[in-house]
Amino acid sequence: MLRWTTYDLIFFDCDSTLSTIEGVDELARLKGKDWRVGVLTQKAMDGDLDLADVYGKRLKAIRPTRGQLDMIEQLYWERLVPDAETVIAALHYLKKYVFIISGGLLDAVAGFGKRLGVPPERIRAVSLEYNELSGEWWRYYDQAVQKHKRYLDFAEGPLTVSSGKPEVVRELAGDLFGHRFFIGDGSSDLATKGNGVDLFVGFGGVVVREKVEREADIFIYPNTLAPVLPLVTGVAGWYALQNTPYQEVFMKGVRLCLSSAVRFNKAELAQSFQKEFETVQINH
């Protein structure tokens, strides 16, 4: 039996993975267009439509301002998935490389990531261009005026198509050494499986997408990111995190991984993980 692999480069999706919201859908809610935009988001995340077919349509429908994206950043934080902050802090404590790759909007995602302690150079999302001549453009120096600048266009790239995240994984990983781990909820995240990452974990704590549930290497059902810690570190993390603020969340993650709350879609993965932790005393 193969030993459990540990991972050094940890990639998180943002919407419905680190936070319980879909940022673009929340922007649409502000404009009273949540049903129309939500349907497009759902179809793209489920893999029924390519993200490229819906990205521009959604933004054209809502035309957000800079100030509204500040509101989404705050909402990301208020709707943080349980244990996300502790998990990321623990990964940093263990000297892991942590990244966020999102098809969301950079202004909101980058601010949210900063609050989680993820450096801006390790965050990728979609940049917007604003109409600098909108509103009282002559007061360009005034921050209050800047918040009213309205969406003009978006930067097309790998994060505005469903198959683009593997390219971003490789770009961010660069020459960094180590195994790569990705966790996300959508079909664009699933595209990294076997294509840039060594282990893909589907997250169903906010929404369960059948394709991701079926095809992920591992699938997490409860609304917590605690299982990420033992999946990333193996039993070495148990030793390293004893008597730290992260020990309790680590053990919570182990208990979940050894229960039906986490599904291993490959028998050899399940056996390897169980073997890894068979000598650890778990307090149920």
Image: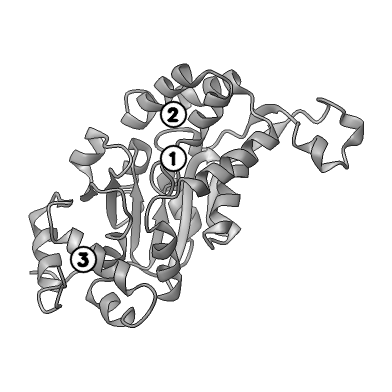
Res 130 quadrant in image: top right
| Residue 137 x/y as whole percent | 87, 30
Q: Which mark is residue 172?
A: none
Report the mark closest to the observer, 1 or 2. 2
Residue type at mark 3?
Val
Query: In this figure, which residue is indicated by the disc labeled 2?
Result: 51
Give the crowd class for mark 2: few <14, some 14-19, many >=20 residues within 10 Å: many
Give the crowd class for mark 3: few <14, some 14-19, many >=20 residues within 10 Å: many
Exactly how many numbered labels are in the figure? 3
Residue type at mark 2?
Leu
Answer left or right for 57 relative to 233.
right
Report the mark closest to the observer, 2 or 3. 3
Which residue is pictured at 37% across the width and 26% down the height? Answer: 42
Real-space Cα separation, disc 2 to disc 3, in angstroms? 35 Å
Q: Which quadrant would the N terminus be assigned to in this image? A: bottom left
Compared to 93, does 163 lie above or below? above
Q: Residue furthest right?
A: 138
Answer left or right for 236 relative to 273.
right
| Residue 81 x/y as whole percent | 39, 50
Compared to 235, does 156 lie above or below? above
Real-space Cα separation, disc 3 to disc 1, in angstroms? 32 Å
Q: Which mark is residue 254?
A: 3
Give the crowd class for mark 1: few <14, some 14-19, many >=20 residues within 10 Å: some
| Residue 241 x/y as whole percent | 33, 78
- Asked if the residue at tag 2 contacts the one at tag 1, i.e. Cβ–Cβ closer than 8 Å, the answer is yes
Which residue is pictured at 51% across the width and 36% down the height? Answer: 23
| Residue 67 x/y as whole percent | 69, 36
Query: In this figure, which residue is indicated by the disc labeled 1?
Result: 164
Q: Which quadrant would the C terminus be assigned to in this image? A: bottom left
